[in-house]
Each structure stands twice: as structure tokens, then as C-alpha cells.
């Protein structure tokens, strides 16, 4: 495949992904709007959550860099090592937002959102498990891209569990 065909394929995949996300957002919101609406308190809490996420990414990068200086233990992660701090940052941002009542928008349909999370998680975990069964997860001692599917699937499981915990806490307080 020549460079033009490769770039065209990447562009088509990128456009399809953006279209899917836009459509999913429209379907997940009660008002059919692709933008999730937040009140001022939620916006402030989300800003704080982004701050914590930013610092957690910086710290995770620093730890990985420091650990890399003193050993080769992370070489088996391959390029996945660049996504681990991002994953940590997303978990921190989501967790802080959930427990400050700033994750779910004013126009979000929670039932559709939970179903969507389950589908995304199952799809990604399925891809990861398929790679493990096909012995494609580790090649030449290095983790391959399906590892990111496992991380994504776990992220949505963590999100769902945190949302359920928050719902139980709120129910108990009422």
C-alpha cells in the first residue's frame, strides 16, 4: 500500500470515528443535541477535575520516565507506554467529575448512556480477548495494540461502577 492510500485510509477511519462520536452524542442526549449541557457548578467542578487529571498525567509520565532511566522493565509495553498516562488521566478526570456530580450532563439520558458504556466496554474487551486467544496480544515479547482495547474496556467498567456507587450514595442521602 502506498503512502497516499495509507493516508486516505486513515482519513476515512478518522472521519467515520468523528461521525460515530457525533451520532452517539446526539442519541445519548435527551434533547437530541450533540453537545452535553452543564450548569455553572458542573463546569467549575469539571475544570477542577481536568486540573487533577493533568497533574496525574504529568506524574505518571515522570514516574515512567524515571523508571525507564533505571531499567528496561517497560520495554515490553512498546508504544502502549504512551497511552498509560493518558488512561490514568482519564480515570482521574472521570472519577473526580462523577463524585462532584459534574460528569452526567443536564440533558444526558442515563439509561442510554449506561447501555452505550456496556456496548463499548464489551466490544473492546471482546477485541482484547480475541487477541489473547489468537496469541496476538504479545509479539516478540512486546504488547500489541489490542492492549489498548483492554484498557478502554476497563475504563468503561470503572466508569459504570463509579456511576453506580455515586447513584447508591445519592440514594442513601435522600
Image (cartoon, grey):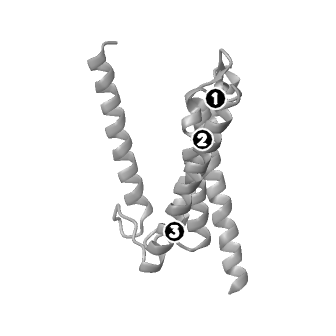
The quarter of the picture where residue 79 lies is top right
What residue sits 56% from the left and 67% below the top?
97
Q: How far apart are marks 2 and 1 (CA)?
A: 10 Å
- Label 1: element kind: helix
The answer to whether the residues at label 3 and label 2 have Cβ atoms under 8 Å apart is no
The label number, if any, that marks residue 84 in the structure image: 2
Q: Which residue is drawn at 53% across and 54% down?
A: 116
Secondary structure under tag 2 reads helix
147 and 115: which is toward the camera: 147
Residue under numbered circle 1:
77
Sequence-earlier tag: 3 or 2: 3
Above or below: residue 108 compared with residue 174: above
> Sequence order check: which comes first, mark 2 or mark 1?
1
CB-based contact (under 8 Å), mark 2 and mark 1: yes
Q: How far apart are marks 1 and 3 (CA)?
A: 31 Å
Disc 3 crowd rating (10 Å Cα; few below 14, some 14-19, many 20+) is: some
Seen at 58% across and 73% down, the residue is: 100
Q: Image quadrant for the N terminus?
A: top left
Residue at x 66%, y 25% (from the top left corner): 76
Does any portion of residue 81 appear in the rendered image? yes
Query: Residue 26 placed where, x, y %?
Result: 37, 59
In the image: residue 43, left or right of residue 97: left
Q: How many other residues sit within 10 Å of disc 1, few (<14), some (14-19) or many (≥20)?
A: some
Q: Where is residue 49 in the image (x, y as percent from the top left)?
A: 53, 65
Q: Is mark 3 on a helix, strand or loop?
A: helix
Residue occupying the far left of the picture? 4
Q: Residue 48 carries which label?
A: 3
**How far across and how far down the image is residue 157, in percent?**
65, 52
Q: In this view, does 108 lie to the left or right of 124?
A: left
Quadrant, the C terminus:
bottom right
170 vs 62, nearest the viewer: 62
Amino acid at each position: 500500500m502506498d503512502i497516499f492510500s495509507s493516508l486516505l485510509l486513515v482519513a476515512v477511519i478518522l472521519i467515520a470515528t468523528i461521525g460515530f462520536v457525533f451520532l452517539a452524542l446526539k442519541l445519548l442526549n435527551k434533547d437530541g443535541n450533540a453537545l452535553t449541557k452543564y450548569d455553572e457548578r458542573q463546569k467549575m467542578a469539571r475544570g477542577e477535575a481536568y486540573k487533577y487529571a493533568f497533574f496525574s498525567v504529568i506524574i505518571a509520565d515522570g514516574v515512567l520516565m524515571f523508571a525507564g532511566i533505571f531499567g528496561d522493565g517497560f520495554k515490553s509495553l512498546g508504544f502502549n507506554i504512551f497511552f498509560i498516562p493518558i488512561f490514568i488521566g482519564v480515570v482521574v478526570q472521570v472519577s473526580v467529575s462523577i463524585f462532584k456530580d459534574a460528569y452526567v450532563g443536564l440533558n444526558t439520558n442515563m439509561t442510554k448512556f449506561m447501555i452505550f458504556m456496556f456496548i463499548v466496554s464489551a466490544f473492546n474487551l471482546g477485541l482484547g480477548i480475541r487477541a489473547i486467544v489468537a496469541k496476538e496480544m504479545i509479539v516478540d515479547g512486546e504488547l500489541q495494540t489490542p492492549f489498548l482495547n483492554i484498557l478502554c474496556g476497563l475504563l468503561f467498567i470503572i466508569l459504570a461502577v463509579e456511576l453506580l456507587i455515586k447513584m447508591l450514595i445519592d440514594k442513601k442521602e435522600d
